[in-house]
Amino acid sequence: MNARFVSDFRRLYLQADAPHPATGTRLALQGADGRVRCMVLSLSRPADWPALSAVWRGVQTDFELPAPAIAVNGTDAYELWFSLAEAVSLEQAHAFLTGLRRRYLADVKSHRLELKPSADSSPATATTPVIPAIQGDTGLWSAFVAPDLAAVFGEEPALDLPPGLEAQAELLGRLKPMPLLAFEAALGQLRPAEPGEASVVSVVPAVASPGAGGSRPLAPDRGSAVAERHEDARRFLQSVMNDEAVPMALRIEAAKALLAC
């Protein structure tokens, strides 16, 4: 097998010390510890690149994440392969895929989507077919494809001939895994809002600037009280920003609020 392709496939998708799976076998998405560094979002019945491309574009433009790999599975689906620089828990991985589905594919019937790994998977069951590979029932091939070629396949996401591994390596070589902090920040925004989460920034008092239209100057006897509350708000936001137990999205919002103080 092409050494360059194996190297980039390992860099993006394999667990530490895991051997590269042979063509035609399945890739384990969870390590022995249950953690995940490769996630796959699949859309089929019919395959629909225009719909899935919204996810591909969205993760880059809305969350500034690296582009996932695009694949045709050789039978009936387009797939996005997401790579993580560091493995995360199964719950985090599935929540990320579920959040993408909720945000970009809400109108797509659930039976057409497959999120891998699933919420109830285990290291033994969380697998996906290795790409590229020949499909035994059709003789067609799966492959990673370039963004500008994805739409060419239409509802027949397969290749008649085996893809060149040097070309496959070139595609994977351009990709980068998601840094953990960037993944956590995106996950924080993709999760459904918990009660009270949206109010973090609102603790900063809305003090009108003297030159703003329609604003009223603060009464002298209220100035010191407002200043004290303002300082309390700053201390609260600093504590939120520095608390590692707080979801990353809230820590980011706290930092933004501090900049506005």
Image: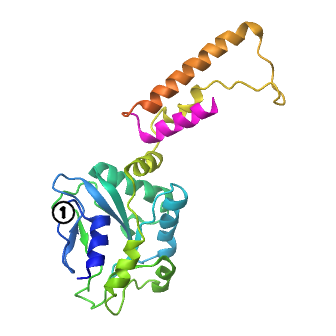
Q: Is residue 88 above or below residue 159?
A: above
Q: Is residue 245 above or below residue 225?
A: below
Q: Which residues are magenta?
A: 246-261
Q: Which residue is mark 1?
A: 125
Is 78 left, or right, of 197 in this rendering? left
Question: Based on the displayed image, in which of its 4 quarters is residue 230 positioned?
Answer: top right
Number of residue marks: 1
Picture coordinates of residue 134 (x, y %)? 26, 86
Give the residue at x 27% y 90%.
Answer: 138
Picture coordinates of residue 56 (x, y %)? 48, 66
Is 228 left, or right, of 191 in this rendering? right
* Residue nearer the viewer, 95 or 181: 181
183 in the magenta segment: no
Query: Which is the main secondary structure of the residues drawn in magenta?
Result: helix
Q: Is residue 71 above or below residue 158?
A: above
* Residue nearer the viewer, 187 or 237: 237
Picture coordinates of residue 220 (x, y %)? 76, 9
